[in-house]
Image: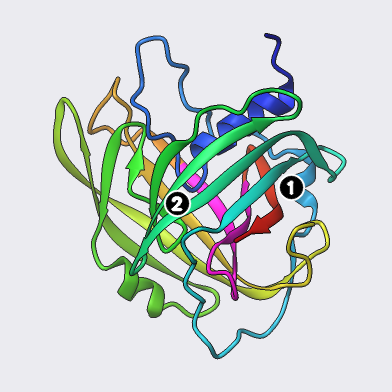
Amino acid sequence: MKLSASFNLSLLLACLTVTACDRPETSKAKAAPDFRAEPRPEAALALYRKAECADAALASPKAGQSFDYLLLASDGKPDRSMARRQTLRAVSGDLVDYSEALIPVGKDSFPPEPRQVRMGILPTTILGGSVRYEGAAAAMEGLRPGTSAEIPITETRAGSPPKPAVATLTFVGCGLSEPIVVGAANEPVRVFHVKLPYSTSEKPGEFTRMIDTEFLVSQSRGWPIAERTPSGTLVLVANAE
């Protein structure tokens, strides 16, 4: 089956944003993309406009909800050839278990895969390795708009002892989502930027890769409604309970 460029990028974003890929790498797997690549044209399009932060804390996501995302094409319009669906299965504190599936238009969906994330934006598994965060919740609570926190992490991967590293979480600020986020336009959001180093099975314990993602987290839903990396942008188009 011939795959379009938008399909390939959707697949990369599905693997390398909030969740990365849970499945282990194999000797035939392609290397993760270099996030130093030149930004895509739609990266210049604003996803939100600045606004004052609400006094209330972010809502907690609810089990049973599903979120459908589409990739923005170079003209800033959603590419409807492929959707990414996240279905929340269980919520315990700031830990969410959910499934994720790619849904091509007019074709069978890919089997959903289990995922787990903290606070909606910090993955606990990356390419078959597990990630543990120290003091992440306290770090987020202490952030103010325009400030960052370094969060100690420990990555555990087969073939290597646990290795420490540091993730950087930045609270960019608050705003209202733009109409380009078609499934949640004009919605209060909190904007976070995550930089998370990780290793691969080929070089376990060597942090040669980096998740570099900006998230628009809905104030009322407690879940991202848009994600942007240097490789592309995903926006929410539908949310169901």
Which residue has dot 1 on it? 43
Query: Quick one: which residue is furthest to the bottom in this view?
Result: 55
Q: Total of numbered circles in the picture?
A: 2
- Residue at image x 78%, y 51%? 44
Q: Quadrant of residue 221?
A: bottom right
Q: Could you tell me which residue is drawn at 79 percent across and 37 percent down?
A: 79
Q: Residue at x 31, y 32 (%)?
A: 128
Quarter of the image where the C terminus is located: bottom right
| Farthest residue, direction left | 161
Render colour scheme: rainbow
Where are the magenta residues, as a range?
211-228
- Name which of mark 1 and mark 2 comes first in the sequence: 1
| Amino acid under disc 2 | Lys
Residue carrying label 2:
195
Q: Classify 179 as above or below 20.
A: below
Is 203 in front, or is 24? 24
Taking 40 as reference, is 49 above or below it? below
Q: Is residue 217 within the magenta segment?
A: yes
Helix, strand or loop at label 1? It is helix
In the shown orientation, is residue 74 left or right of residue 239?
right
Residue under the point 75% across and 58% down: 183
Comparing 61 with 215, the one in front is 61
Q: Is residue 40 left or right of residue 15?
A: right
Q: Main secondary structure of the magenta part?
A: strand
